[in-house]
Image (cartoon, rainbow, N blue to C red):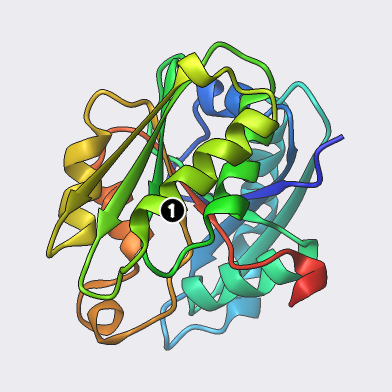
Amino acid sequence: MSTERALIPIRILEGQAVDDDLAALLDPIDVVLLGFHEVPEQTAPSQMRQEFEERARVALDSIADDFEGPVETRLVFTPDRDESIERVAADVGATIVAHPNPLRPVTSMLLVIDGPTDPTRLAECVAAIRAGRDIRITVLGVAGDEVSDLGNAVETARETLVAAAVPPTDIETRTVAADSLVDAVVDAAVGHDVTVMGEHAPDWRTVLFGEVEERVAAESLGPVLEVLRGRPDEQ
């Protein structure tokens, strides 16, 4: 049984849902649904919870019913979305955070390898999600100034996929040089149903423009799966 666990944050009072095809894609691994509502600074979270908890709980349970397997649910009213996602992810032992754009039946996945990410961990997560299904995988290496051995990293990801029983004929590898990781991934995501990326440590770009994975999700048609750094028992 897979040890991977996906956390899916949902804006639960804004009508956001989880696409049936995304639910089916994640069926081989454990899923935790995080229903959240961002509370204005001048409002107490407890006040919002008291007023809207029942409505939010009904909506969250309805989404959970769409999953075939057992699903854990969490509900938070928070002034800080990112902090709550990080806290709940650590609490439930999530290894993946899903950014749920609409999805069609999955036939292809884009696995992004760049400097800060661990190619073995990303490939392990992709293999666990693929779970023997007929899904082709493109391993994309994106080179920036800090990357000196990208070819080996891409090959490591490919070898990990093959070792996990993904047929070599279902794997394509390529590398690109790019000043912008987000632009390179968004361009490459065209023609793929799902994008898988590693979590990136915050830097000045995050402060100015937002999280890399969220920016890719905002500019892509399909969902983005963010593989968190390290396993829960390694943190």
**In the depicted structure, whether residue 218 falls above or below residue 229:** above
> In the image, is 52 to the left or to the right of 58?
left
Mark 1, Cα crowd under 10 Å, few <14 / some 14-19 / many 20+, is: few
Q: What secondary structure is marked by label 1?
A: helix
Residue 154 in percent (x, y) is at 42, 47
Residue at the spot 59% in from the left edge and 78% down from the top edge: 45
**In the depicted structure, whether residue 106 falls above or below residue 183:** above
Residue 141 in percent (x, y) is at 32, 49
Question: Which residue is the site of mark 1?
Answer: 152
> In the image, is 113 to the left or to the right of 20?
left
Question: Residue lying furthest left in this view?
Answer: 179
> In the image, is 125 to the left or to the right of 182?
right
180 or 223, which lies in front?
A: 180
Q: Is residue 126 visible?
A: no
Residue at the spot 21% in from the left edge and 44% down from the top edge: 186
Quadrant assignment, res 86: bottom right
**In the depicted structure, whether residue 24 falls above or below residue 157:** above
Residue 205 in percent (x, y) is at 23, 79
- Quarter holding the N terminus? top right
Q: Amino acid at mark 1?
A: Asn
206 or 75, which lies in front?
A: 206
Residue at the spot 26% in from the left edge and 87% down from the top edge: 204
Count of labels in the image = 1
**In the depicted structure, whether residue 87 falls above or below residue 60:** below
- Quarter holding the C terminus? bottom right
113 or 163, which lies in front?
A: 163
Residue 176 in percent (x, y) is at 19, 48
Residue at the spot 59% in from the left edge and 25% down from the top edge: 25
